[in-house]
Amino acid sequence: MKGNLLKRLSACALCITMACSAVPFTAYSVSAATSSSSSASGNAAFSTDFEDGDCSMFSKRGDSDTSVIKVIEDSKAPSGKKVMAVTGRDQSWNGPSLGVKGVLQPGVKYDISVKVKAQWYNTVCISLQHTPGGSDEPQYTNLVKGVSQGDYVELNTSFSYGAEEKDVSIYVETWGDANDLYIDDFTITPAANNMDVNAPSLKNVYGDMFKFGTACTVSELAPDSTKALIRKHFNSLTAGNELKPENVLDREACLALAAKGDDENPQVTLETAKPILEFARKYNIPMRGHVLVWHSQTPMWFFKENYDPDGDWVSKEKMLKRMENYIKNVFTAVKKDYSDVNFYAWDVVNECFDDYGSPRKAGFPSESNNYEASPWVKIFGDNSFIKPAFVYAKKYAPSGCKLYYNDYNEYMQKSDAIVKLCQNINSDGHYIDGIGMQSHLNVTNNGSSDPFPSVSMYRQALEKYSKTGLDIQITELDCTVNDKRFDLQAKYYSDILDALVDYKDYISAVVVWGTTDDISWRADRDPLLFNQDYSVKPCFESIVDGIEYTDTDPDPDPQPQNNDYPTNVKANYSTKYHQVQFVWDKVQGADKYGIAVYLAGKWRVQTSNVTTNSYVTPKNLTPGMTYKVAVAARVNGKWNTTDPIKNAITVTIK
């Protein structure tokens, strides 16, 4: 029975003997998880094949979800005879949701595998719902998708979440019809970490030429393993979503001010970005701000009278006032709360041209216009809003923060329009410092053997922008490849980096858009430098090979590598309540901690279900009693029982 036991119990191998005796802690024994299924559960944090008939861990996605969720028999079940059926769906987002509280742990990267069948042809998807700390607005991320043609397809992906996030759940949905779904073999496993700690550091390899950075979201940053990767390789960090207008604008505060008669001073909050900003501050990692003015990921109400999404569009004059106040308030918040974070660059305006170099069509981005329309153009009639944005940004930006126009397909026909725009912005002063080349590139060009753009085409764009006299930053680099042709990808990455090195005198930063392939927004085509398990790819090796560089000083606060037991265990005493708090350094990849006490010649487990690096005993222990206490960690489903006992500490109740 993979269902009930595995999701509710954890195996504990802390103690040498599990004998029962009266102790001044709450002592109990923990049974190893067993399974009536023939398939092995391995080190899964959660796993079910529904053979026990139980799907109680899955629920509908709210009261308006019409799904009926139950276990049925299916002669075509991938394993066994039973599957979870999801019928009666009225909307594509209806479906089974698994809340992770009590099942999974924050700060751990997990791999998910599930087999899904749609009633007829449909795109099926595993998605993540979570509410960032400091926010009441849930966010939704599509993790992986596949096409079912009435057959079972296996979906595999990874995810993680931070301790500050709330209401975290994994769910299955469709991108097409709301037809019936059938689900089997749902497994979540702690992800492997095969980061090569001896690999050359990218920030060192290119340190004499330009910054080498990455982008990540709060969820992507959550695992300690990802933090370690970023700290080793990158000296620039971009928030993937958390500094975009939809996450910075504080609607409740905006509405409250509008109710008092002022709808020209948009209020902001940096709470959603807090984990990224705190991480950058702690480890002194310079940041790129992304982005202030954009047609996408900016709520409709921001452009309407009294912030009413159904209201009238505001006038140009009011929108200019809102724009200035919004930019001022963002930079004021940064200066106030994160003055010690080095924001060395900020994308002021993003993606204002179509591929032909014309302004976007007027309107709000939606499915009907392929999400390409611009509310800014709707209000201004053209791109005349861009220069004021830079004038305001120049006025309020933190000292030393350079300002950029950022765009994609920047190596195509729109490149001339970008150059002309930048010249216009600086026609009567210096407001823009540089051009951001997103550089979302394609190695096999959706199946063909020719990359797009070609390296020569990309070089031509570099040459064109270098002649503007403005700084160049590569802001969102990734290179997709089909059919795992990593040999072609390695060659292309190498050629692109060779071009960037040739123009290093004009380039101040190169930023890769993401950390590992599985988390990339283009995950289906493996566009990044690191595999799902953090190991280096051939394209990583191709861009560090043959470059002479100088190692910088080692990380002053390195993350423990391959340690599977807690160190630096300390005891804090309460003489008032006669109890003890134990604290220890976190163990990378640990999802549970266990406490054992040595009594009467035997080690006895007190708990194996601690999820943080702290444990507090019950009150009113006997003063003067002395105990030997060991703390162990569960890493990748395994407990180290030897080292914690060797490093046990002795405490005397006060």
Image (cartoon, rainbow, N blue to C red):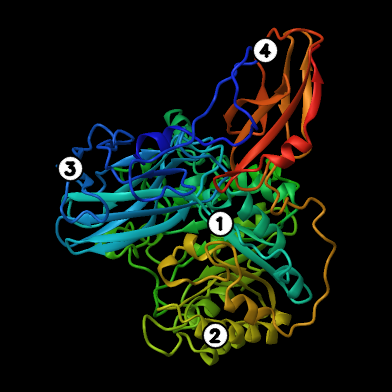
Q: Is residue 22 left or right of residue 630?
A: left
Q: Does label 1 or label 4 sit earlier along the sequence?
A: 4
- Which circle's residue, 4 or 3, is located before the other in the chain? 4
User: Which amino acid is tagged 2?
Assistant: Tyr
Among numbered discs 1 and 2, the one appearing first in the sequence: 1
Query: How many angstroms separate mark 4 from mark 3 (CA)?
Result: 48 Å
Q: Point out the frontmost of discs 1 and 2.
A: 1
Mark 1 → mark 4, Cα distance in angstroms? 38 Å
At x 72%, y 73%, the residue is 210
Q: What residue is shown with label 1?
A: 192
Return the x and y of residue 197 as percentages of the image width and height: 71, 63
- Amino acid residing under circle 3: Ile
Instruction: Give residue 492's mark.
Output: 2
Disc 4: which residue: 24
Task: State yes or no: discs 1 and 4 in contact (Cβ < 8 Å).
Answer: no
Q: Residues within 10 Å of mark 4 (few under 14, many from 20)?
A: few
| Residue hosting label 3 | 72
Q: Secondary structure at mark 1?
A: loop
SS at circle 4: loop
Disc 2/disc 3 C-alpha distance (Å) = 49 Å
The 10 Å Cα crowd at callout 3, few under 14, some 14 to 19, many 20 or more, is some
Q: Measure how far apart labels 3 and 1 are at the Cα level.
A: 33 Å
Given the image, on which type of amino acid does mark 4 rest? Pro
N-terminal-most mark, 4 or 2: 4
- Identified by mark 1, the residue type is Ala
Answer whether labels 1 and 2 touch (C-beta < 8 Å).
Answer: no
The quarter of the displayed image where residue 579 is located: top right
Q: CA distance from mark 1 to mark 2?
A: 28 Å
Q: Is residue 119 left or right of residue 548?
A: left
The quarter in which the N terminus is drawn is top left
